[in-house]
Amino acid sequence: MSGEKTIAVSDVSGSPLRGRGGHRIIIAGGGTGGHIFPAIAIANALKKLDSRAEILFVGAKGKMEMEKVPQAGYEIKGLDIAGFNRSSLIKNIWLPFKLIKSFFQVRSIMNAFKPQAVVGVGGYSTFPVLRLAQAKGIPTFIHESNSFAGKANMMLGRGATAVFVASGGMEKFFPKDKISVVGNPVRPVIAKSGNIGKGEALGFFGLEEGKPAVLVVGGSLGARSINEAVAEGLDALISAGLQVIWQTGKTDAAKWVGAANGKKGIWVGDFITQMEQAYAAADVVISRAGAMAIAELGVVKKPVVFVPYPFAAEDHQTANAMHLVNDHAALLVADSEVKENLLPTVIELAKDIIKQEELKSAIAKHGVVNADEKIATAILNVLN
């Protein structure tokens, strides 16, 4: 496997690589925006470097990738697969049958598409797709976005051609000679948020200039603890002279919209389609600590108060957040302390310009804008 160690990730000029091109590549995974958006970024980078590349996504039926991937212009096949349900063990009775069925579905997809490489980004569909590809001797590549690797990725890492990670210290999860530290792919439009004027961005949300704005993002499905704290504290935020851009997520969206009804200086919605505007408008951010959120916040250089989701696998969100907190690049409020401590922490930070600048400077060191090109270049270097 010594040849795998020499995979080049330095050529990120964006010019097409030498070779025959037109490669067929499967990208597997999804479930959350933290997996889907990096996957799409990698696909776009592959197409930029190899305009004739054929890319097929494989995801889980019923998950958001089945909607977001076609919107990005790519074909996707769905598998009948689900993960282990920790809250209701009885629901896991069909899990082995779904896994077996998914392997048959993957076999059919591969026989038809004949991929020359398979990329896994995490999510339910990653394991059966990469496992079968490895059994067939097809080069496989893993992108692990978190600072604490998932069990499936750890099992797949042993047979992978290369493992791309966001940060150092991942040797405890993957073979050292297969690791390339590249960062997390960020949507190009996010990287350009700095080109948007603050006044324009505030106007996009119907807010006014001259008042600090707090951006609240709990993820595509929402974060109940954060939403409850914000709903109860809207008057306190307004009294402190703050404005709020509040992405509630889909869960109980109507309830949260109702909580903001009639209050001035509050934009509320279940999903922000143009996050670049939200980042440009924000002075302070409240966020979960998923890998994608952390990657984007590093690129846009925003002061953030993280509230890690405590039930994420292996509590990886806390590990993600602490990586920045220990570097004095972010603040953290535990999910169990949100009701008491979140809004006082945010209000204090919004009034402390010096602290904001310290956090901006520190988190900027973690921003990576070309991870997608590094990954795409490395994959094509193997295939060419």
Image (cartoon, grey):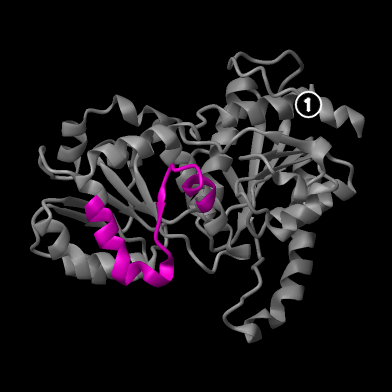
Residue 340 in sight from this viewpoint: yes
Camera-nearest residue between 370 and 80: 370
**The residue positioned farthest toward the right in the image shown:** 1
Instruction: Please give the range of residues in magenta.
Output: 322-348
Q: Is 337 colored magenta in this rendering?
A: yes
Q: Position of residue 16 (x, y in %)?
A: 64, 15
Q: Residues within 10 Å of mark 1 (few under 14, many from 20)?
A: some
Residue 215 locus on image (x, y percent): 28, 49
Disc 1: which residue: 7
**What residue lies at 19% left-to-right and 46% top-to-bottom?**
351
The quadrant of the image that shows the C terminus is: top right
Amino acid, disc 1: Ile
- Residue sitting at x 42%, y 67%: 335
Dominant secondary structure, magenta: helix
Residue at disc 1, secondary structure? loop
Q: Position of 215 compared to 326: left or right? A: left
Residue 278 image offset from top left, x and y in percent: 29, 42
Q: Position of residue 289 (x, y in %)?
A: 47, 54
Q: Please tell me whether residue 318 is drawn above or below residue 172 in the rendered image.
A: below
Residue shown at 23% from the left, 53% from the top: 348
Question: Image check: 288 left or right of 97?
Answer: left
Where, by quadrant of the figure, is residue 276 drawn?
Answer: top left
Q: Residue furthest bottom?
A: 90
